[in-house]
Amino acid sequence: MSVLEHLEELRGRLLIALIWFAFAAGLGGWYFNEPVLSFIQTPLKTGFFDFEKMHVLEFQAGPDGTLRLAGASGAVDLETLNNKVFQLRLPDGRVVTIGTDNSRTLFFSNLFTPFWIVVKVALLIGLFFSLPMWLWQFWLFIAPGMRRAERRAAKRIILPSVLLFPTGALFAQYVLTFGIRILMRWGVAGMEPWLDVSQYLSLVLNFMLVFGLLFQTPLIIIFLVLTGVVTTAFLRKMRKYAFLLIIIFSAILTPPDPFTMIGMGLPLYILYESSIWICWFIDPSSRRSSAQS
C-alpha cells in the first residue's frame, strides 16, 4: 500500500473510533453523568470528612414533649458549631446530620462552569466506553504490517490493556483520598478551604488519566520481551534504574507529600516486578536464558 492509501485507511479507522466515542459520550453522559460526578467527588468527601471528630449532640424528650440536650455533659456552645457539620441523636435512635462544611463543598465563580463540568464528565465516560473500539481500530491498522511474533504478542495484551486502564483510574481515587486528607491537615490556622470545582475536576481527571496510562507499563514491557526487543535478564539488571525513574515520576506527578508519592510509586514498582515474572512464565526463551545464567 502507498502512503496515501495508508493515510486513507488511518482516516477511516479514526472516523469509526470518533463516531463510537461521540455516541458513548452522548448516551453515557446522559445516563451516567450524575453517578460518575458523584464518584469523582469521593476523594473530597472521604478525604476531608472525619466522623470521629464530628460534633454529636444527644437529645432526650422532656416532660413537656420538647427535645433537650441529654445531661450536663451534652451542653455545648452553639457558636462553635457555626459553619460546621454536627449530628443530632434523637430519643428514638435516629441520627440527623445538620450543617455545612466548606472543605467538602465545591464552588464555581463562572456561570458556564456547570455546563463545562457536564461536558468533561461526558467525555470521560465516552473515553471509558469507547476504549475497546479505539484499541480494536488501532489493531486493525497496525496488524497487517506486523510480523507473526509481534501479532501473537499483541493479541496477548489487548484484553489486559482494556482492564488495566480503568483499574489504574480507580486506584487513582484511593491515592487522591489520602493525598487530600494529608494536604488539608497542613492548612494554616484561621483559613478555610474554598475549592474551585474546575480545578478539582481537572486534578482528578488528570490523576485518573495518568494512573490509567501508567498501569499499561507492564503490558509494554511484556510486548517488548515477547518481540525480542529486551530480555528478562536485562530487565532484572535495570531494576535500580527503574526504581529511580519510578521515584522521579511519582514525585513529579503527585501532590508534594511522601504518602501520595508512595501510593503511586509502590504499585508501579510492583507492576514492574510482576511484568518480569509474567515474561519469565510465558516466554520460553526467558526461562532458558535464566537456566543458562
Image (cartoon, grey):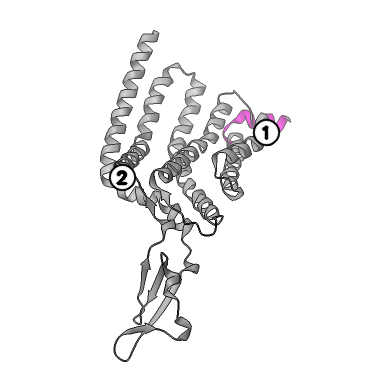
Res. 74 visible in picture: yes
Circle nearer the N terminus (1, 2): 2
Label 1: state its secondary structure: helix
Who is closer to the viewer here, 273 or 206?
206
**Can you name the residue that lies furthest to the right here?**
293
- For image coordinates 48% across by 46% down, the residue present is 172
Query: Which x, y percent locates residue 261?
Result: 59, 45
- Check disc 2: other Cα within 10 Å, few if <14, some if 14-19, many if 20+: some
17 part of magenta stretch: no
For residue 64, above or below residue 45: below
Q: Main secondary structure of the magenta part?
A: helix
Query: Which x, y percent locates residue 267?
Result: 57, 44
Quarter holding residue 282: top right
In the picture of the structure, the residue carrying the numbered disc 1 is: 241
- Check disc 1: other Cα within 10 Å, few if <14, some if 14-19, many if 20+: few
Image quarter of the N terminus: top left
Label 2: state its secondary structure: helix
Is 84 left or right of 14, judged from the image as shown? right
Q: Which residues are magenta?
A: 281-292
Is 182 left or right of 28, judged from the image as shown? right
